[in-house]
Image (cartoon, coloured by chain):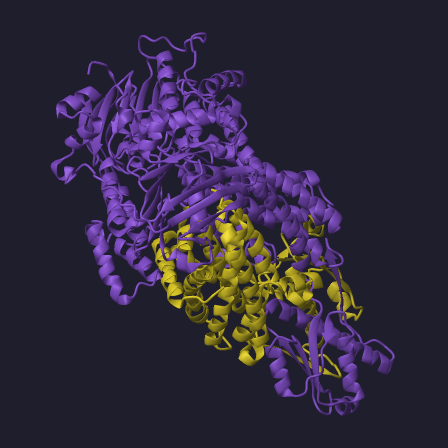
Chain colours: A yellow, B purple
Amino acid sequence: MGGFSLSNIFRLGLKELRSLAADKVLLGLIVWAFSGAIYEAATGSSQQLNNAPVAIVDEDNSPLSARLAGALYPPYFRRPELIGLEQVDDAMNRNLYSFVLVIPSHFQHDVSAGRRPEIQLNIDATVISQAFIGASYINNIASGEVGEFLTGRRAEEDTPIRLTARARFNPNLTGLWFGGVMEAINNVTMLTIILVGAAFIREREHGTIEHLLVMPLRPFEIMMAKIWANGLAVLIGVAFALLVMVKQVLQVPIAGSVGLFLAAAVFYLFSAASIGIFLGTLARSMPQLGLLIIITIVPLQLLSGGVTPQESMPAAIQNIMAATPTTYFVRLAQGILYRGAGLDVIWPDLLGMTAVGACFFTIALIRFRKAVTQTQV
Amino acid sequence: MDRPPVARLSGVSHRYGAVVALDAVDIALPAGCMVGLIGPDGVGKSSLLALVSGARQIQVGQVEVLGGDIGDRHFRATAQPRIAYMPQGLGKNLYPTLSVFENVDFFGRLFGQGKRERERRIDELLTSTGLLPFKDRPAAKLSGGMKQKLGLCCALIHDPDLLILDEPTTGVDPLSRRQFWELIDSIRARRPGMSVLVATAYMEEAERFDWLVAMVDGKVIGTGTPAELRERTGQPTLDGAFIQLLPEEQQRAHQELIIPPRVDSSPGYAIEADRLTQRFGDFVAVDGVSFQIDEGEIFGFLGSNGCGKTTTMKMLTGLLPPTEGTAKLFGKTVDARDLETRKQVGYMSQSFSLYGELSVAANLDLHARLFHLPDARRGPRIAELMERFGLEPYADKAAADLPLGIRQRLSLAVAVVHEPKLLILDEPTSGVDPVARDEFWALLVELSREQGVTIFISTHFMNEAERCDRISLMHAGKVLASDTPAGLCAARGEATLEAAFISYLEEATGVSGQLATVNWENEPKMKSAEGPPLPVARPAAFSLRRLLGYAYREALELRRDGIRLAFALLGSVVMMFVLGHGLSFDVEGLRFAALDRDQTPESRDYIANVAGSRYFVERPALADDADLDRRMKSGEVSLAIDIPEGYGRDLRRGRKPEVGVWVDGAMPYRGETIRGYMDGLHRDYVRQMLREATGNTPAKVLEIESRYRYNQDFKSVYAMVPAVIPLLLLLIPAILMALGVVREKELGSITNLYVTPVTRLEFLIGKQLPYIAVCMASYLLMMGEAVFVFGVPVKGSFAAMTLGALLYVTATTGLGLLMSTFTKTQIAALFGTAIVTMLPTIQFSGLTTPVEALEGAGYWIGQGYPATYFILICRGAFTKGLGFADLWQSLLALAAFIPLLTVASVALLKKQES
C-alpha cells in the first residue's frame, strides 16, 4: 500500500455526513439512542435491591412480629403482604414474591425467654441478582429489630473488632450512576457497528463502491472516510449523552475527565467501525448482515463487563472477550468516569483496544476488494 | 374508435413529491387490442400503467378499468384476478433464487389454483415459451430474454382479460425480443378478447401495435393507430412522428446526428483484451473474450442483459480480477493498485452510481477534488462542463431528483471531469428517450473526434451500435463477431444490423426465431372469442391456499440462503453457549489487596482469613495510601483492606480496633455483593475468635434459616440458562423477520401483493410461517443444549414450555414483521429493530432484574413485553417444576401479543403503493 491522500479521506467523509443528514429516520434513531434511551435505561433498571416483593406468614401475631413486618419498607422492599402458610408455595411459584418470611407461633414469647426461635426465610433463588443481597439485608434487619426489642436500644454489636466498610466512587451504590453510562457505551457499540456495516452493504448493493474503486482512490481511503464521518456523528452523540443527559438531567457526578473519555472514545469508534466494515465484508446481503450484527453485538454488550463483572466469567470467555475492543473500552470508561482514572492508569487498555481494532481494520482492508465483487442482490 | 374502452382515465393527476408524473390525463383505452404507450422515460407511462393495474393508489381523478372503479377496494378485489401486470425492470417481480417452475407455480397458488390445474397450465406455458428445458434453473441465472418470458408465464397463469406490460423488452437481445412479440401474438390469436397494454421505448416495436398513446411530461400529446400518427404528422417513421408531436420548445435543435469519419492516426491500442475469462463458481460469465481497441476509436459492445458485457468492462477497469487471460490499458496490464492508469480512465456504471443526495454542482466538485484537479483548474473545468452538458439550470438540484436523461448527462460529465483518455461506458443510455439519447451521442462524438478520447461503450440499441466505428456482438459470455457495422451486415448478407445480429444469434444458439410460435390448435380455447368476458366471482376474502403459497415460497427462499439459515440456527446455539457460561452473577474471583500498617501476627491472621475464602483472590500487598488509591482507580483491586497501626496491640488489650474496608462501588451490584461477603467473613471471624477465647459461641438472638428455593446451590447457570433462551428467541427471530417485507419493497417483488388477490393477512402470515418453523427448530436445539451441555434439567412441563415457545416465537417474529411493514429501507428496519429489541429484552424483561423491581417506563415496558412472560415460563418450567396449571396466565399473556401484533402489521401494511 503506497501513501494515501488526507484530502480524499476528508472529501469522502464529508459526502458520508451529507448522506447521513439526508436520512431523517436514521437521524431520529441516533438522537433517541443518546437521549431518551439513556434516560430510560438509567432510571428504569437497576441491579441493586429495589422494590423487592416480600410476604410474611405471621403465625405469631405479636407486637414483635408486627415490628419485623414494619421494618421492611421502600425503597429496598415493598411493604410486605401478609399471607397464609398454605399460600407460600403457590405464591412463590407464580413469582409474586422474591422473599417470604415465616414467623412461627410463640415467636415473641420464645425470644423473650431467650430460646432463640428459628424463623424461616424463603428466597426465590432464580432472582439471581437480588437473592443474596436481599437475604443479607433481611437478616441484618431482623437481627437488629429483635435485638432492639430485647435491650430497648439499637445495640452496637458487642464485637472485639469493628468493621467500617465504605464504598468508593459511588458511596451509596446508586444504580442510576451505573445504568446511564453503560447504556451510552452500549449504544456507541451498536450504532457504530450498524451505521458503518449497513452503509457499506448499501453502497455495495447500489454499486457506488465500485464507482469509487474505479477512481484513483484506495480502499484504505474509502474505509477511513466512512470511519471518521460516522464516528464523528456517534462521538457528538456520546458527548451529548454524557454532558447533558448523564451530568445535567440524571445528575450523576462524573469523577474523571470527560475530555480524556472522549479522546479514548475516538479510538474505540475506530475499532468498532472496523468491526462494522469487517462484518460488512463477510455478509453478502443486508439480511445476512442483520443476523451477523445481532450475533456480534449481544455478546459485546452482555459479556464485556457492563452487565456482570468479567472476573466472574470462565477463563475461556474472558480470553474470547479480550479479542474484542469493547472489553477494554468498558474497563477504561469505568476507570475514567467512575474512578477518576487518568491516562497513566488507562493506557494499557487504550493500547489493547486500538490494537484489536487495528487487526479488524487490516482484515477488512484485505477483504475489501473481494467483498465488493461478490455482492449478491 | 368504436370499441368499448378497457380502461378510462378522467382527470387523473399523479405526483411524487414535487415531481408531476401525470397531469390531468383524460383518455379512454380501447379493449380487445394492443395498446401501446410511447414516449421518453419519466413521462408518466409507468405511473399510468400502475394506476390502471391497481398497484398504485390514485391521487386525483378517476380510473375505470373493466367497467368498474379501480380505486374502489371491493371492485379491485373482483377485478384483480382478471388483470395481469408485469412491472418494469427485468424480472422485477420474480424471485431470483426460485426456479422457473417454482416461480410460475407460486403465481398459480396466489390465484387459488389447485395442484393439477397449476401443473397443466405451467406445462402448457413453459412449452409455448420454450422454457421447459430450463424448468429447474433459478430465475437469477436466466438471460434477460428468458426472464421476460418467465415473467409473461407468471402473468398469464390465470388467463387475464387485461395484460399490462411495462417496457417488457428493454434490455433484451433482438432475437428474444422478436420471439417475445411472436409469443404475444400467438396468445392473442388464442384469446382474442384479451386486451394488452404495453409501454415501450422502442419505436420500431410500436409500429406493430393497434393503437398508440404518445406521452410527454405527464400529458397525452397524441393518440391513434401508427398509420394515423404518421399520416397526421407527415413523417415516414414513428420516431419522426413522435418528434413532430412534441411541443415546439422540446423539438429544440433536434437534428440528425452526423458522425464525422474517424481519421485513423492511431499510435497504439487503448485496450487490449486477450482471452479474458471470468467464472463465478461453475457459471462462466465471460468466456475467452479477445479484442483490441485503437486509441480514439468508438468501440461498441452489443448484446442482451446478462451476456457478460458488464463483467468484461469490470475486468478492464480492474474491479474484477480475471479468472484467466489478460487485459491491458495503454499497453500496461490492468492492476487494481495502479492509481496512475485509473486517472486516464473515466467509467460510467450501468446503474446510476453518483450520490443522489448531493447536488449537481456538489457531485462535480467532489469528483474533481477526488481526481485532484488543481484549485485553479477546478472552477473553470466545472463551469465548462456545466455549460457544455447543459447542466447549468440544474446546478443546485439534488442528483436524485433529475430526469433520467439529465442524470445520464451528469454521469458523463463526472466521468470526464479529469479529461481521461479512455471512457468506459456501461449502457449509458438505457432507459433514456430518443431525443436525449441523440444529445448524449453528440457529446460522445465530440469527445472522440475532437479530443481523441477512446470510447468503449455497451448498448442494446441497434441504432447506437450503428454509430460505432466497430462493434463486437456478444452472447452468453462469448464474442460472436467483431467488425464495422457495415462489415457485419455484409458478412451475413443482411440489410440491417438487427437482422445480422439475429442471424449470428441463431447460428450461435442453434435456435430458430420461429420456435416460439407454438401450435395452439390442439388445445381447447379457454374462452369464447366473442362477447364480453365472463363475469368473474370475487375471490374469497381468505384463502388458505394463497397463504400457504406465500409460506411455501418464503420457505424455499430461506432454504436457498444457507448462510442465513446457518447463522440463525448455529448462531443461537453458539450464542447460548457463550452467554450461558459468561452471563454469571456468581461473584467470584474478586481481587483484593491489603494495606497492613500493623504487620503483627493478628493483622496477618485477619488478612489470611479473607484470602482463604472462595470469593476473594489476594493481590500483592498495598504499599501506602497512594498505592491503594492508584490500584483501586485502575480497577486492579475491587476490595482494599486497611488495617491501622496498633491493631494487634489494641486487639490484645480489648480496645476494639477498627478495620477499614474500601469497596469499589463503580459497579453497584458487585459492590453490594462484596460488602455482603465481607460482612459475613468478618462476623464468622469474630465469632470464631470469641469461641477460641472463651470456649463457647456467643449468644445469637435468633436463628434465620435461609432457604434458597428452586436453586439450592445458588448457581447462576440454573437461573441464566432458562433466561438466555427467551433472549435469543427474541433477538434473532425479530431481526430475521425484520427485513422480510422491506426487502420485497426495495427489490420490487412487493408488486405481487399489490396486484394479485392475496390479502395482507395471507401475505403476512404466509411469510411468517417458515420463520416460526426455523425458530422452533432453534428452540429445540437450545433445549437440548441446556439439558445435555449445561446440565440444567427441566423439572416441570416440557409441553407447557414448548407451547409457550410456539406462542413466543410467533409473537417475536410478529414484532420483526411489524417493524418491517412501516420502515422504507432495510437499514432503517435493521436499526429500528435493534433499538426496540435490545434494551427492553436485556434490561426490562427480568433477565437480570425482576420486572417488579423496575421503575417508571422500564416497569411498564417490561409488563408489555413478550420476553417477560416467556422468561417466567422458562424459569418456571426449568427450575420450579411448574406445568400448565401454574403457567396458564403467562401463556395467555403471550398469546395475547399475537393478534395485537398481527392487527397492527395488517393496519400498517398497504395493499397499494402510495
Q: Residue at x 68, y 43 (%)?
A: B781
- Image x and y of residue B576, in percent: 65, 51
| Location of residue A316 in the rendering, given as x and y in whole percent from the top left corner | 70, 61
Residue A187 visible from this viewpoint: yes
Any part of residue B168 in sight: no
Find residue B58 and report its image quarter. Answer: top left
Residue at horizontal 32 percent and vertical 34 percent from the top: B485
Question: Which residue is nearer to you in this view: B131 or B853?
Answer: B131
Q: Report how many numbered discs are placed on residues in the image.
A: 0
> Please, is residue B311 above or below residue A123 in the view?
above
B359 left or right of A39? left
**Residue B203 location (% of width, % of height):** 26, 28
Q: Give the x, y percent position of residue A154.
A: 66, 77
Q: Residue furthest right?
A: B695
Name of the residue lying farthest toward the left:
B248
Query: Does A347 sit above or below residue B744?
Result: below
In the image, residue A129 sits, relative to residue A112, either above or below, namely above
Q: Nearer the viewer, residue B593 or B257?
A: B257
What residue is rendered at 76% in x and 58% in y?
B713
